[in-house]
C-alpha cells in the first residue's frame, strides 16, 4: 500500500465532501457514482481500489458535516437535512445562524463517537437477526412507509383544526406513489440507458436522485430570494445534557436504519423526530433537534459501511460505489478497520472545517450571485446526467424534477420522495 497515495486520496475525498456539502444540488452520491465510473481509468493511473474507496468514504462523511451550511444560510436543504431547516432558519432570523452550524457540527462529531460505541453490539445483533429480518423485510419496509406518512404534520398554522393533518398525509402518500412509480419505470427500463461516456456500469440512481433531490431544489432556490439578517452570536446556549441526548437519539436512529434497504438518513430523521419533538414554545427543543438530525446523517453514513462488512449489503449510493470498486459486496476486516480509522481522522477535520466555514459563510454569500450559481450548477448537473446515462437518463432526470418540487409546495417532507426506492422494494418483496 502506497501511504502517500492513500493520504492524497483521503484529502481529495475531504475536499470533495466540502464542495458537495457547500453547493446545493450536488449530493455526495453524485461524486461517488462519478468516481465509480472512472475507477478503471484511476486504477490505470496507479490508484488502488482501497484509495478510491477511501476517497468516497471521506467525501461521504465530510458531506454530512458540511451540508448543514446551505440548509441554514441559503434555505437549500437536501432530503437528509430538510427537517433541520425550520429550527435552523429560526435561529438564523434571530441572529444565531453560526450557532446552528456549531450545534450541527457537535451532533455529527458526537455521532462518530456514539457509532464507535454501538458498532460491536449492533453488528453482533444484526449479524444474528438479519436472516429473520430479511424474511419479513417487506412488512418491515411497509411499516416504515406507514409511519413516514402517518407522522406527516404538514405546515403548522395556529388555529387550524386537527383534521388538516389528513390532507397533508394524503399529499405525502401522493408524493410517495408518484416518486415510487417513477422508480418502478426507471428500474424496469434501465437497460435503455446509452451513456455518452461509458466507464464502468451506468447507474439509474444518478439521474433519479439528481432529479428528485438535486435539480428540483436548485430550481426552487432560483425562484427564492435569499435574505440573511445581521448575525449576533455563535455562542452555544444548549445544555450539555440536551446535546448528549440529541446526539444519542439521532445516532441510534441513523445506525438502525442503515441496515434496511431503501431506508436512507432522510427517513431516519423522521424516527429521530419522534424522540426529539419540536416544541415551538421551547427554543432549546429546536437546537436539540438540529443536533439530533446531524447525528442521524453521520451515523447513517458510518453504519452503511459497517453493514456492508457484516451482512454484505449496500444501503447507500456511496456504499454501492465502494462495493463495485472493491470487487464485491463483502469487505475484509483489515479494510474495514482502516476505513474506520480514516473516518475518525476525517471527522476531526470536518468538524473544524464546518465551524470555520459557518463563521465566515456570510462574507461568501454576500459576494456571489446565488441565482447564477444555481443556474451553473443545474447546467452542470444536467450535463453530467446526459454524459453518464444518455437520453433515457435525461428523461428520468427531467421527470424527477417536478416530482421533487412538489414537497415544499405541498408543505410536506422531502423524505416521502424516497418512494422512488421503497415502492420498487415493496414490489420486489411482495
Image (cartoon, grey):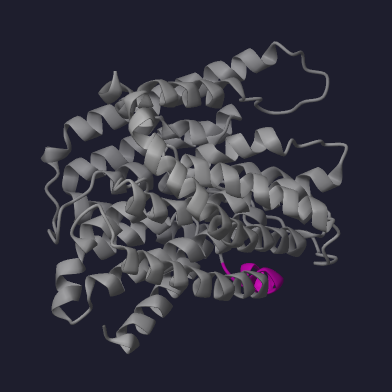
Residue 68 at least partly seen: yes
Q: Is residue 42 magenta?
A: no
Residue 262 at least partly seen: no
Q: Residue at x 27, y 28 (%)?
A: 184
Q: Is residue 400 left or right of residue 200?
A: right
Q: Residue at x 55, y 56 (%)?
A: 115
On screen, residue 167 above or below 422: above
Front residue of 77/342: it is 342
Q: Main secondary structure of the magenta part?
A: helix
Q: Residue at x 49, y 31 (%)?
A: 416
Write down the region rendered in magenta: 357-368
Q: Where is residue 239 shown, x and y percent of the image?
A: 85, 56
- Quarter of the C terminus within the rendering: top left
On screen, residue 268 above or below 148: below
Q: Is residue 363 magenta?
A: yes
Front residue of 358/320: it is 320
- Quarter of the N terminus within the rendering: bottom left
Q: Residue at x 64, y 51 (%)?
A: 225
Q: Where is residue 96 shown, x and y percent of the image?
A: 80, 60
The answer to which image quadrant residue 233 occupies is: bottom right
Extreme residue in the bottom direction = 4
Amino acid at each position: 500500500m502506497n501511504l502517500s497515495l492513500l493520504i492524497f486520496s483521503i484529502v481529495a475525498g475531504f475536499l470533495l465532501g466540502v464542495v458537495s456539502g457547500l453547493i446545493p444540488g450536488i449530493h455526495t452520491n453524485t461524486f461517488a457514482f462519478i468516481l465509480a465510473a472512472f475507477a478503471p481509468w484511476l486504477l490505470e493511473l496507479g490508484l488502488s481500489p482501497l484509495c478510491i474507496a477511501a476517497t468516497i468514504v471521506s467525501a461521504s462523511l465530510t458531506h454530512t458535516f458540511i451540508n448543514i451550511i446551505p440548509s441554514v444560510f441559503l434555505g437549500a436543504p437536501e432530503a437528509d437535512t430538510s427537517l433541520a431547516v425550520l429550527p435552523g432558519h429560526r435561529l438564523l432570523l434571530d441572529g444565531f445562524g453560526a450557532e446552528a452550524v456549531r450545534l450541527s457540527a457537535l451532533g455529527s462529531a458526537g455521532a462518530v463517537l456514539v457509532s464507535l460505541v454501538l458498532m460491536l453490539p449492533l453488528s453482533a445483533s444484526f449479524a444474528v437477526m438479519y436472516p429473520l429480518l430479511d424474511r419479513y423485510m417487506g412488512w418491515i419496509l411497509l411499516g416504515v412507509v406507514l409511519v413516514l406518512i402517518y407522522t406527516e404534520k404538514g405546515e403548522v398554522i395556529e388555529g387550524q383544526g386537527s383534521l388538516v393533518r389528513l390532507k397533508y398525509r394524503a399529499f405525502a402518500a401522493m408524493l410517495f406513489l408518484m416518486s415510487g412509480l417513477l422508480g418502478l419505470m426507471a428500474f424496469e427500463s434501465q437497460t435503455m440507458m446509452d451513456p455518452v461516456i461509458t466507464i464502468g456500469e451506468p447507474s439509474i440512481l444518478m439521474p433519479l436522485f439528481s432529479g428528485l433531490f438535486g435539480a428540483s431544489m436548485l430550481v426552487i432556490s432560483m425562484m427564492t430570494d435569499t435574505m440573511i439578517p445581521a448575525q449576533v452570536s455563535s455562542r452555544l446556549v444548549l445544555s450539555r445534557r440536551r446535546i448528549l441526548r440529541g446526539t444519542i437519539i439521532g445516532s441510534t436512529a441513523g445506525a438502525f436504519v442503515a441496515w434496511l434497504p431503501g431506508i436512507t438518513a432522510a427517513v431516519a430523521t423522521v424516527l429521530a423526530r419522534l424522540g426529539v419533538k419540536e416544541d415551538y414554545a421551547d427554543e432549546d427543543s429546536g437546537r436539540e433537534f438540529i443536533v439530533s438530525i446531524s447525528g442521524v446523517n453521520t451515523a447513517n453514513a458510518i453504519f452503511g459501511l459497517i453493514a456492508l462488512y457484516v451482512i454484505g449489503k449496500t444501503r447507500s449510493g456511496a456504499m454501492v460505489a465502494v462495493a463495485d470498486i472493491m470487487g464485491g459486496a463483502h469487505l475484509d476486516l483489515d479494510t474495514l478497520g482502516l476505513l474506520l480509522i480514516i473516518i475518525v481522522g476525517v471527522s476531526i477535520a470536518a468538524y473544524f472545517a464546518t465551524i470555520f466555514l459557518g463563521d465566515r459563510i456570510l462574507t461568501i454569500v454576500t459576494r456571489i450571485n446565488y441565482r447564477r450559481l444555481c443556474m451553473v450548477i443545474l447546467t452542470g448537473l444536467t450535463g453530467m446526467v446526459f454524459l453518464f446515462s444518455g437520453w433515457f437518463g435525461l428523461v428520468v432526470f427531467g421527470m424527477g424534477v417536478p416530482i421533487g418540487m412538489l414537497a415544499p409546495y405541498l408543505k410536506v417532507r422531502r423524505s416521502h420522495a424516497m418512494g422512488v426506492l421503497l415502492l420498487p422494494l415493496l414490489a420486489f418483496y411482495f
